[in-house]
Image (spheres, grey):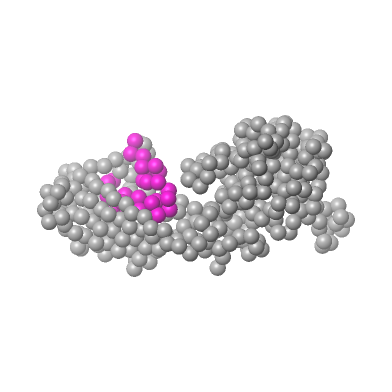
Amino acid sequence: MSDTTLIMLCAGNSSRFSMEVKKQWLRIEHEPLWSFVTNKLASLHNFADIIVVGAADEIKFMENYSEYTFVEGGSTRQRSLENALKHVTTPYVLVSDVARACVSKEQLENLLTYKEDVESVVPYLPVTDTVTYKGDTINREDVKRIQTPQLSKTDYLRKALETNEEFTDESSAIVAYGGRRAFVLGEEDAHKITYVSDLQKLSCLKAPATVTLSGNGFDVHAFEEQKEMFLGGIKIDVPYGFAAHSDGDVAIHALIDALLGAAGMGDIGMLFPDTDAEYKGVDSKELLKEVVAKLCSFGYIIVNIDLTIAAQKPRLAEYKTQMRKVLASVLQIDVSRVNIKATTTEKLGFVGRSEGVAVIANANLQYFNWKI
C-alpha cells in the first residue's frame, strides 16, 4: 500500500486566464482538464488516495467523471489545501495544480526519491537569463523557478499552514516553519497553464473531440386564471398563465433540460429546485442565462436549439418570431439557429382540452475548441 496521497487543486476561478471557459473545464478530447491531469498523475503511481479539490458549485458535476474523493475548495489556494489535508491519512502528500498538466513519470519518481530525507521536495527550473532585482544584477544561479507537484510530510505541512500568512506553494510554508526543502530538477514540458497562450506550449494536450452532443427536454404546465403568461421568453396577451413555482415558462424549462441533458449535467430541478423560495415567481429567462453561463464556463458552446410547443390555446403564430429573437439573445447564438414550431394535439389529451401546454425541446452542444 502506498504511503502517499495525491491532492489535486482545481477550485481556482481562472482569473488570469482571460477566457469565459474556466481553465479546469477545457476539454482534452472528451475529458475536462482537471480530470485529464488527475488521471495522468494517478497512472504514474499507486497513490493511497486521490483528493480533488473543486469549487462548491462544481463538485456535483465533477463526480460524474470519477470516484475520487472530492473536497470543497476555500477562498484561497492555501485554504483549499487545508480543506483537503483534513482528509489525508498517509504520512506523505503530493500536491499539484490543475494548471500543471504534463508531469512525467521520471519527474514524479525524482520527487519520491527524497521524501524521507526532508520535509518538502520541490521541482525547479534554473534561470538562464540575466536577473535584476530592485536595480541590482543578482547571481542567476541563486534564482530558481519553482514548479509543482511538490511532495511534503503531511503532519509537518499541516502545522506549517497554521498561520494567517499566505504562501504561494507548500515548500515556502514549510521553510517558513523551519522545515528543510530539497530541490530536484524540473521539466520544461511541465509548463504551468496561466494564460491562454500557455496551452500551445504543452505537447501532451490533445484538442477537444469534434463531436456534437445532443439533449432533449420535456415539460408541461397547467393553466391558471388571472395570471400573466410567459412563454418562450415573452409575454403572451391572454388572461391566464401557468400554474408554477416560477413564472411557468414551460418552453424555457424544457429548453434548460435539453441543454443540461446534452452536457450530462442533470436537469432543471438540480439547479433550481421548486422548493427554494429564491425561485418563487422568477423570470425563467434569468434561469436560462445562468445555465448558458455555466455551460460556457464548463467548456461547451451551443450549436442550435429546436422547440415544439403543443398548445390548443393560445394561438402562437404571431409570437414565434419574437420568441426566436429573445431566446437567441439569451443563448448568445444567431437567430437562424433557434427554431420554434407550434402545433395542436387535434383536441386530444389535456392539451387538446385546453388545460395546459406541453413543450419538447432539443439542443446540440460542442466542446469549446481552445486549440484553434
User: Could you tell me which residue is drawn at 62 percent across and 51 percent down?
Assistant: 40
Give how far across and how far down residue 285 sits, in percent.
Answer: 35, 52
In which quadrant of the rendered image does the C terminus lie? bottom right
For the point 65% across and 41% down, the residue is 47
Where 21 sits versus 240, above or below? below
Residue ranking furthest to the front: 1
Looking at the picture, how far across and down is residue 251, in whole percent?
Answer: 28, 53
In the rendered structure, the answer to whether residue 366 lies left or right of residue 312 reads right
Count of numbered circles on the image: 0
Residue 264 in the magenta stretch? The answer is yes
Q: Which residues are magenta?
A: 247-275
Q: 308 above or below 56?
A: below
Left or right for 335, reference 228: right
Q: Residue at x 12, y 56 (%)?
A: 346
Is residue 199 visible from the viewing direction of this image?
yes
Q: Residue 29's spot in the image, x, y percent?
A: 53, 59
In reply to whether residue 310 is colored magenta, the answer given is no
Residue at point 59%, 46% (across, down):
10
Q: Nearer the viewer, residue 249 or 108?
A: 108
Image quadrant assignment for residue 104? bottom right
Above or below, 42 against 232 in this view is above
On the image, the x and y values in percent for residue 263 come to 43, 53
Front-most of 350 and 178?
A: 350
Closer to the camera in the image, 4 or 195: 4
Residue 21 visible in this rendered orientation of the protein: no
